[in-house]
Amino acid sequence: MLSSYAVVMPSMKIGGGNRVLLQFMDEAIKDKKNCKLFFLDRKGDVFDSHYSNSVPQRMLGDGVLSVVLFSIILSFKVRFDKSIVAAIVSDPILSFFSFIYANKRRVRFVQSNDFLLYEGNSKGGKLFNSIYQYFFKISQKYQYHSVLFNSTYSLNSYNETLTSVQHYSTKYIVNPAVFTLKYEKNIGIYPSVGSIRVCIVTNAHPRKGYQQFLEIAKHSKLKGVNYIVISQDDLDSELKSVTHVKPRSDKEYVDALKQCHFVLSTSTFEGFGLALIEAMALGIVPIAFYNPGLDEFNTEKNITIIDNVVDFDNKITKIASDKDRYIKLSDSAIKSASVFTTQNFYFSMMDKIK
C-alpha cells in the first residue's frame, strides 16, 4: 500500500487559505507522492477542475452542529485510512478534532492568528467566540509533529496571544506561494486620471476592512474611478462605482483581477496578504493600509501605504498621472511576487513534515 499524505480542509470554497493547501497537493503529486483530500462539501462550493489531481472525500455540512458532527466523521476517516502517514490541517475548527487521528504525523499550518478569528465578529456572537477560544486553547496543547506559520507576523502574533500555552520559533515559518494558474502581465493596461480601475479581494470579516473600503469609495473626490469587489461573500453596496464579482473558479478570479490597474487592501490583520501578492504577480500596483503582515513580501517597498481617503486620492492621482512610475511599480510588484514559487513552498513544507 502506497503511503499517502492527507490534506484536511473545511470546504472547497475558492480562497487563498484553501488554495495554499491545494498547491501543496499539486506539487506533491508532481513529486510522485500520493495525496488524499478530505474536505467538508458545502452547498454552493465549486471544485475547481484546475485541481483535478486531488482525491476528494466529500462530506455534507451546514450550520455549527453539522460542521462539528461532520468534522468528527471526517477526522475518523483520516484515522482509519491505513495509507495515511501524515495529515496537514490549517482550519482551526478542524484542528480541534485532529486528536482523533493522533496515530498519524500531524502538521498544523497556521495562516493567521486563529485565536482572534471570531473576535469582534458579530456573526458568531460573544458566546460563540468564548466557546471557540476555550477549545482553541485546549487544541494548542496537542502534540503536533510540526506547527508551521505562513509569516513572521503570524508567528509573533500567535506567541503574544498564547504565551501561557505554547511558544514557537522562527524555524517554523513557511511562506505560501502565488498559485500556479498561469499569470501574464497586463501588457499595455495603464491607468490615466479619469479612467482608473481598483479591485479589492475581501470577505465579510471585520478585520478585512470592507467598511473602510466603502468609506473610500463613497468619499473619494476622484472622478472616473471604478471599483471591483472580488469576494465569495454577499457584500452589499449601493454605490454605482462598485461592481461585485463572485468567482466560480481560479480562472474567473484571475480574469477579474486583470481588469484592474490597482489592488487595494484595507485589512487590519493579514497573516501574509496572499490576495495582494497574487494581484502583484500580474503587475497590478498595490495600495494598502499598513499592517505588519505585508512586511513579509514588501521588501522592495513597492506597496503604496495610505492612511485615509485623502491620502488614497493623492497617491492614486500621482501614480496614474506618471506612466513611467506606474510601469516601474508594476515591474517591482512582479519581482516581489516571483520569489514565492509553489516549488519553494512545497519543499519547505516537506522538509518540516519529514
Image (tube, rainbow, N blue to C red):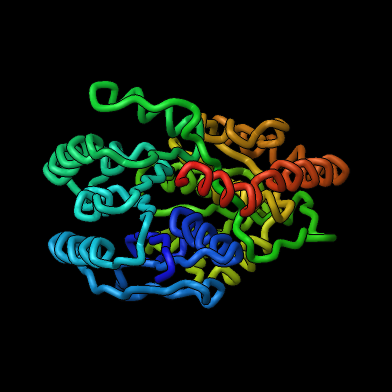
Q: Residue 12, can we see it?
A: yes
Q: Position of residue 164 (x, y in %)?
A: 23, 22
Q: Residue 253, can we see it?
A: no
Residue located at (66% from left, 36% from top): 303
157 sits left or right of 123 in the view = right
Task: Tell me the quarter of the image containing the N terminus.
Answer: bottom left
Query: Does 111 sit above or below residue 27?
Result: above
| Outermost residue to the front | 1
Residue located at (47% from left, 46% from top): 354
Front one among 126 and 92? 92
Choose top left, top right, bottom left or bottom right for residue 182: bottom right
Q: Position of residue 346 (x, y in %)?
A: 56, 52
176 sits left or right of 76 in the view = right
Residue located at (66% from left, 35% from top): 304
Q: Position of residue 56 (x, y in %)?
A: 38, 73
| Outermost residue to the right | 324
Residue located at (49% from left, 59% from top): 19
